[in-house]
Amino acid sequence: MKFNVTSNGLIFFKKKDGITIEQNFPLKEISEDEIIEHRLSDVPGFILKKGDKLYYSEIPNNSRLSNNEITEIHLCSSLSKTCKHLSAALECDGGCQKVRDISIDSYPKERLDYFSKLISAKRIEKYPFVTYGYETFNTVHNCLVVMECKNHEK
């Protein structure tokens, strides 16, 4: 499934019997606290981060957004631009917090301490150095793609 982001929201394009079908999902500006509430639900979601603003939309559970038109390049680990900081070392030793953090998908939601794990888990909204990117959660194919990063060095 391909997608694009416009001023009106997120648009998915899929082909069925040779015909391209468009599905629109409006993006709304959202706070970090609201995002955490959405993450705790079972509703599949999409977060777009542009500068210090966050935008959210519900999306289909089977969305696979890791390779699409919007993904100009995933700065952390693309073939030609892999970041020198792609390491779990501390920042003072050349590493990156995004690499050290554990994906929330690793924790079952039934556990009582899921919320505390969510606070320390990998989430696009908690990285001030990521200035443009997106993340999906509660889907079959979760992803976090960084397209602009203040710390990127190749």
Image (cartoon, rainbow, N blue to C red):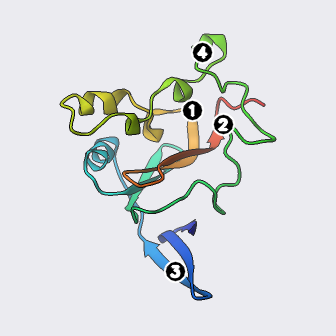
The first of marks 3 and 2 along the sequence is 3
Secondary element at image label 3: strand
The first of marks 4 and 2 along the sequence is 2
Are discs 4 and 1 less than 8 Å apart at CB?
no
Q: Position of residue 139 (x, y in %)?
A: 40, 55
The first of marks 4 and 1 along the sequence is 4
How dense is the environment of label 1, judged by Cα within 10 Å: few (below 14), some, or many (20 and up)?
some
Q: CA distance from mark 4 to mark 3?
A: 43 Å
The first of marks 4 and 3 along the sequence is 3
Q: Which residue is rendered at x = 58% and y = 88% of the image?
A: 17
Name the mark on residue 129: 1
Q: 38 or 127, which is in the foreground?
A: 38
**The N terminus lies in which quarter of the figure?**
bottom right
Are discs 3 and 2 less than 8 Å apart at CB?
no
Q: Which residue is rendered at x = 44% and y = 38% of the image?
A: 123
Q: CA distance from mark 4 to mark 1?
A: 16 Å
Amino acid type, residue under disc 2 in the picture: Cys
In the image, is 114 to the left or to the right of 6? left
Q: Is 124 placed above or below 57 here? A: above
Secondary element at image label 1: loop
Residue marked by disc 2: 76
Residue marked by disc 4: 89
Name the mark on residue 22: 3
- Which mark's residue is nearer the viewer, 3 or 1? 3
Amino acid type, residue under disc 4 in the picture: Ala
Q: Is 4 placed above or below 82 here? A: below
Amino acid type, residue under disc 3 in the picture: Glu
**The C terminus lies in which quarter of the figure?**
top right
